[in-house]
Image: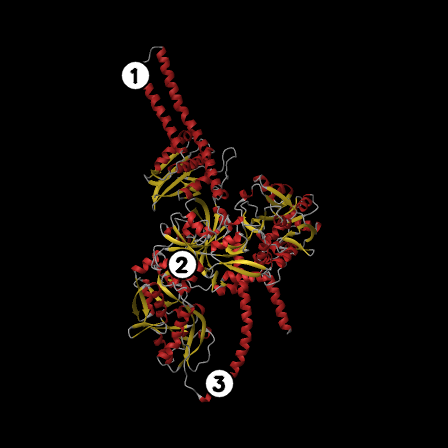
């Protein structure tokens, strides 16, 4: 026992070590600070949960967790100064009466008086009100927002929205109270804080309207402005805290919202008086909105009816259901004949006579049409068609108002609508998806009608609420409390009772066309019982029955081609001579030329031996032994990875493997358990038995040629519709693991003893099973919480997050909405990936992401909004299926700054050019002046001849043309029309050198050229700017050399591997080695600050690599007898 206790404590020590960070290393100055200030005064708020709050006199929260870690790693002790006013805490810190504020945002005012650590928490703020009625801050003009005094948003609202009144309060609880008591219309807070406070104080009337786009989501610690050393210590600890510790803290305080359990609801005295007087609540009941709300033989039934009964019971109210047509029920609540409409969507008209409770459920919409129709897929296909809708429904009005080309005929009941579709009186309807499937299945329309997938109606919101009479606000509050009190078990029971509609199968037009135009060639293994084999020249087996079920559901045309061995079957798939193998498993090798369906059947890989062998518990017992297996069989592929020391003997098929075992030439045979059992019986091997399992699972799937993604999609869709009964029927037909042995009476005593031991073992295992079931439930709950926490973590991420599966958007976070300036996730959920990336597909992004690096691309939402973004992509398992998570960062600001840098660089280059042009023009202007003066003098002395006049004028004309050409070159350079055009590289050199020629001559610089006549298709003006920058740098370097030394710039242009290679070499002394790596950095220059901006080579690098898609390199070299040269090499694609 002592040893066990000792091991237990060792385990605790090891576990603690794994999940804690090491102590940080402090400098001498930091140690002296802690010695001088062993007790740090920390200012804390009483009501800002879950981040910091005081409960029963004790300081708690996420921030306290961080402070505890800081104390553990540094030895600093904290004294907590409690105040319920944030403004007071801030003033005391500024006055140096408090040393540290543990969580706050930066503002211009606080940055002047406090010192801040690095960011350590990110949160998102929302606007909250009593009802969901605001879309943005402009809706709050001339209204009041409650904000704790000196919060960052107080200044922001006052500065940006002067027509919004700010009600200053002491803390967040007072802000909530201000909204509940109608002193303010709204408040601004983090969702975690509101969730915590409203639950604690049993407040149900606070709802989130929209997230705030003001970027004050980053939280810091701050100290008094003379405690810089403390900031250094805090930053060290924050950097040293492990990911595990951070996750543990956040899971404890931010993501620990537990599912409510049944408990008594706490009522105020006013609510108790109301319930005692009310006693009964009158609720609307429709005739036939199945399975939600309907009446059968005078009895109200349905999901929502049962839900309202549950809620009313929690309030001790008797529900009385009033049944009528929908439009009559609406009139009744207006006339105060009933109290509640139990399941309605929000619209402005209803707000005049109804209060809305919290959301009661969400609905998905679908189109119902005739099973024979293939042309109706989405809402646009209903234009100029007659459809049926329920009279006065909100969705009916939305379709009539927003889709004027759809001809809406109104009915009183859903059953009337479906009957009208069946009889061709109308073509379709739009219904709640669950309700549509319920009607089709229950009323036997399954052979006549179908649903065709989810649809979105403009202006129609999917969330549904209870509507309560405007004069009964307390009843709304009470129902909200009851909704909060509904447990997960109660909700699950309701869903299991009513959400039992069958799964729908929806094929795309491409899939339908594929089915219509293709015959599927099946590579059918003829001797792998019970999965696939041939009897009487007919395919049989479990795989055949599954395929038969799939092909019949979607009318796939099939051609069976029998193969004697599996190796041949794989080869035919690889060569595209066959389309599919009905049952196998995926391996890395096969994935190179094939794709796989979802898993159809799972079975362990079994072990067959001679009967004398004992029980074999797992595959490790086979290592070092000869084991027979079919050549290329999946069993060998899977086992060789787990047990590499097994000596496999390959056979043509399983029968040949059993023959080897029967003759004692191998120790065992391995294959799927059903295959072993079936073939032992089929071929009568009386000396062979199944002795155990390898514990390796065979996930059986259909193998499909890799260019038939569409067939994979069809197969997977059909697999989802196969019921458990259908699966069980196929399994029971073919899978039978029992096998008989000749009875041996000499073993009776062994059997009795064995039975007794087994019985005891079963009793023991039964107790274990009960315990395991409890653990399993606990694990399942933890997994569900983990998934929810995963989604919450994505929602607080500062990058936009997108999860895509099957080319559909399955998840997006709030930040992506912020980037796209959208108000609702519903606008993108389940939409095609191409909605955001119209010229891309997920495969192209995967190819770009092969290096696992981020890359730039344009996001184009609905051809209305184009945003440059930085993207990183990773495959994940989401909702148990392979998906892709995409991280998106908006580059709009960065790109704008890059454009400014480009213009700044270009202006610097223009200055350089103007200087060179000034040098060039001096001589021509002098020539013109001299010629003109000469003409004047000769005219005055009457010595001007016609020949002299013509010669002088010719000189002036040619000189003027030279000046004009210089102006043209300058104009071409400053043009901003960025177009790809074909041009000769030598032309760029000639233009740039013509501008710089005079400057080079003045500095005794000689140009040596070896230029091939190469034409490229690119941006000529940008190449001109690059050359001007490089020549300017060369000239500046050569200017430093004395005039008696030789000064050269060598230019070489040649063609290599479909690229133009440009080399520019000067003998100006080279670049220091330590500076070479920095030459392409912005604002880096080796010149005096008055001579250069440090942008020339930075922009040169960006132009070559990003705009012209080329490469550039700078290095030191020896050339033409000169030791210290600088060489610039540029490679540009010709096309």
For residue 542, which quarter of the picture? Answer: bottom left
Q: CA distance from mark 3 to mark 2?
A: 68 Å
Residue bearing the label numbered 1: 947
Residue bearing the label numbered 2: 416
Percent of width and height locating residue 918: 43, 27
Q: Nearer the viewer, mark 1 or mark 2?
A: 2
Q: Quadrant of the C terminus?
A: top left
Pointers 1 and 3 in contact (C-beta within 8 Å): no
Percent of width and height locating residue 392: 45, 52
Q: Is residue 450 above or below residue 868?
A: below
Residue bearing the label numbered 3: 751
Q: CA distance from mark 1 to mark 2?
A: 108 Å
Label of residue 514 in the image? none
Q: Nearer the viewer, mark 3 or mark 2?
A: 2
Viewer-side residue, 823 vs 844: 823
SS label for mark 1? helix
């Amino acid at each position: 026992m002592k040893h066990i206790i000792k091991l237990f404590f060792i385990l605790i020590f090891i576990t603690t070590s794994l999940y804690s960070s090491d102590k940080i290393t402090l400098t001498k100055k930091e140690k002296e600070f802690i010695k001088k200030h062993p007790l740090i005064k920390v200012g804390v708020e009483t009501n800002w949960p879950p981040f910091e709050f005081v409960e029963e006199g004790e300081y708690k929260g996420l921030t306290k967790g961080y402070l505890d870690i800081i104390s553990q790693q540094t030895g600093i002790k904290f004294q907590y100064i409690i105040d319920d006013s944030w403004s007071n805490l801030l003033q005391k810190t500024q006055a140096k009466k408090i040393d540290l504020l543990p969580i706050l945002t930066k503002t211009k005012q606080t940055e002047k008086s406090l010192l801040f650590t690095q960011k350590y928490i990110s949160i998102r703020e929302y606007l909250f009100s009593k009802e969901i009625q605001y879309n943005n801050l402009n809706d709050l003009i001339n209204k009041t927002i409650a904000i704790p005094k000196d919060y960052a948003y107080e200044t922001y609202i006052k500065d940006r929205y002067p027509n919004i009144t700010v009600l200053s309060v002491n803390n967040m609880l007072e802000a909530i109270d201000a909204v509940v008591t109608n002193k303010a219309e709204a408040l601004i807070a983090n969702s975690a804080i509101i969730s915590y406070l409203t639950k604690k104080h049993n407040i149900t009337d606070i709802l989130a309207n929209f997230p705030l786009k003001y970027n004050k989501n980053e939280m810091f610690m701050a100290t008094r402005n003379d405690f810089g050393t403390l900031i250094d210590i805090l930053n060290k600890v924050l950097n040293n805290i492990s990911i595990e510790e951070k996750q543990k803290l956040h899971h404890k305080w931010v993501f620990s919202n537990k599912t409510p359990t049944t408990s008594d609801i706490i009522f105020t005295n006013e609510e108790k008086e109301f319930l005692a007087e009310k006693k009964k609540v009158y609720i609307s009941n429709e005739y036939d909105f199945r399975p939600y709300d309907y009446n059968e033989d005078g009895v109200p039934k349905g999901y929502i009816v049962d839900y309202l009964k549950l809620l009313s019971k929690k309030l001790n109210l008797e529900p009385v259901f009033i049944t009528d047509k929908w439009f009559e029920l609406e009139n009744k609540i207006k006339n105060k004949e009933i109290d509640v409409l139990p399941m309605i969507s929000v619209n402005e008209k209803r707000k005049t006579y109804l209060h809305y409770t919290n959301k009661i459920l969400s609905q998905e919409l679908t189109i119902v049409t005739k099973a024979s129709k293939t042309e109706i897929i989405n809402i646009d296909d209903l234009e100029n068609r007659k459809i049926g809708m329920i009279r006065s429904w909100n969705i009916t009005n939305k379709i009539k108002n927003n889709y004027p080309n759809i001809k809406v005929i109104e009915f009183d009941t859903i059953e009337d609508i479906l009957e009208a579709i069946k009889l061709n009186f109308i073509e379709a309807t739009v219904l709640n998806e669950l309700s549509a499937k319920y009607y089709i299945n229950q009323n036997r329309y399954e052979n006549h009608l179908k649903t065709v997938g989810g649809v979105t109606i403009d202006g129609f919101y999917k969330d549904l609420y209870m509507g309560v009479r405007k004069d009964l606000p307390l009843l709304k509050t009470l129902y909200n409390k009851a909704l909060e009190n509904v447990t997960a078990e109660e909700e699950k029971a309701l869903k299991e009772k009513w959400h039992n509609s069958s799964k729908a199968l929806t094929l795309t037009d491409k899939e339908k066309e594929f089915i219509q135009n293709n015959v599927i060639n099946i590579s059918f293994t003829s001797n792998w019982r019970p999965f696939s084999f041939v009897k009487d020249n007919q395919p049989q087996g479990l795989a055949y029955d599954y395929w038969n079920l799939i092909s019949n559901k979607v009318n796939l045309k099939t051609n069976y081609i029998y193969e004697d061995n599996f190796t041949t079957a794989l080869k035919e798939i690889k060569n595209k001579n066959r389309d599919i193998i009905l049952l196998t498993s995926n391996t890395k090798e096969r994935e190179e030329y094939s794709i796989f369906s979802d898993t159809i059947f799972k079975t362990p890989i079994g072990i067959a031996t001679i009967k004398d062998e004992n029980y074999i518990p797992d595959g490790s017992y086979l290592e070092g032994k000869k084991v027979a297996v079919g050549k290329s069989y999946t069993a060998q592929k899977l086992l060789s990875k787990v047990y590499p020391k097994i000596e496999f003997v390959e056979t043509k098929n399983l029968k040949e493997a059993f023959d080897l075992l029967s003759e004692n030439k191998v120790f065992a045979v391995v294959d799927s358990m059903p295959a072993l059992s079936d073939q032992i019986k089929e071929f009568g091997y009386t000396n062979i038995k199944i002795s155990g399992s390898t514990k390796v699972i065979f996930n059986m799937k259909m193998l499909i040629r890799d260019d038939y993604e569409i067939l994979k999609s069809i197969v997977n869709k059909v697999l989802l519709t196969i019921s458990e009964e259908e699966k069980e029927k196929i399994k029971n037909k073919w899978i039978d693991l029992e096998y008989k042995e000749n009875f041996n009476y000499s073993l009776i005593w062994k059997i009795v003893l064995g039975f007794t031991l087994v019985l005891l073992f079963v009793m023991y295992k039964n107790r274990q099973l009960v315990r395991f079931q409890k653990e399993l439930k606990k694990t399942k709950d933890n997994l569900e919480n983990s998934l929810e926490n995963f989604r919450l973590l994505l929602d607080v991420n500062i990058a936009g997050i997108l999860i895509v599966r099957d080319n559909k958007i399955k998840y997006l976070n709030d930040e992506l909405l912020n980037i796209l300036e959208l108000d609702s996730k519903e606008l993108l959920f389940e939409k095609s990936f191409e909605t955001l990336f119209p010229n891309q597909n997920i495969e192209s992004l995967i190819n770009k992401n092969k290096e696992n690096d981020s890359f730039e691309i344009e996001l184009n939402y609905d051809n209305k909004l184009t945003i440059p973004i930085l993207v990183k992509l990773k495959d994940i398992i989401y909702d148990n299926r392979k998906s892709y998570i995409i991280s998106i960062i908006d580059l709009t600001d960065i790109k704008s700054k890059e454009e400014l840098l480009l213009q700044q660089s270009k202006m610097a280059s223009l200055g350089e050019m103007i200087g060179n042009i000034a040098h060039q023009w001096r001589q021509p202007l002098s020539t013109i002046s001299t010629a003109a003066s000469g003409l004047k003098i000769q005219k005055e002395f009457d010595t001007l001849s016609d020949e002299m006049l013509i010669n002088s004028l010719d000189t002036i004309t040619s000189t003027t043309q030279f000046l004009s050409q210089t102006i043209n070159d300058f104009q071409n350079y400053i043009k901003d029309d960025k177009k790809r055009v074909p041009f000769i590289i030598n032309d760029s050199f000639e233009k740039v050198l013509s501008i710089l020629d005079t400057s080079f001559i003045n500095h005794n610089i000689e140009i040596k050229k070896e230029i091939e006549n190469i034409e490229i298709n690119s941006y000529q003006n940008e190449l001109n700017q690059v050359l001007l920058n490089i020549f300017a740098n060369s000239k500046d370097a050569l200017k430093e050399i004395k005039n008696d030394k030789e000064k050269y710039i060598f230019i070489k242009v040649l063609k290599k591997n479909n690229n133009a290679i440009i080399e520019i070499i000067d003998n100006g002394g080279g670049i220091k080695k330590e500076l070479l790596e920095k030459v392409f950095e912005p604002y880096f220059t080796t010149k005096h600050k008055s001579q250069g901006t440090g942008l020339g080579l930075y922009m040169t690098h960006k132009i070559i690599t990003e705009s012209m898609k080329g490469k550039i390199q700078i290095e030191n070299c020896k050339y033409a007898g000169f030791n210290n040269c600088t060489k610039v090499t540029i490679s540009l694609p010709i096309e």
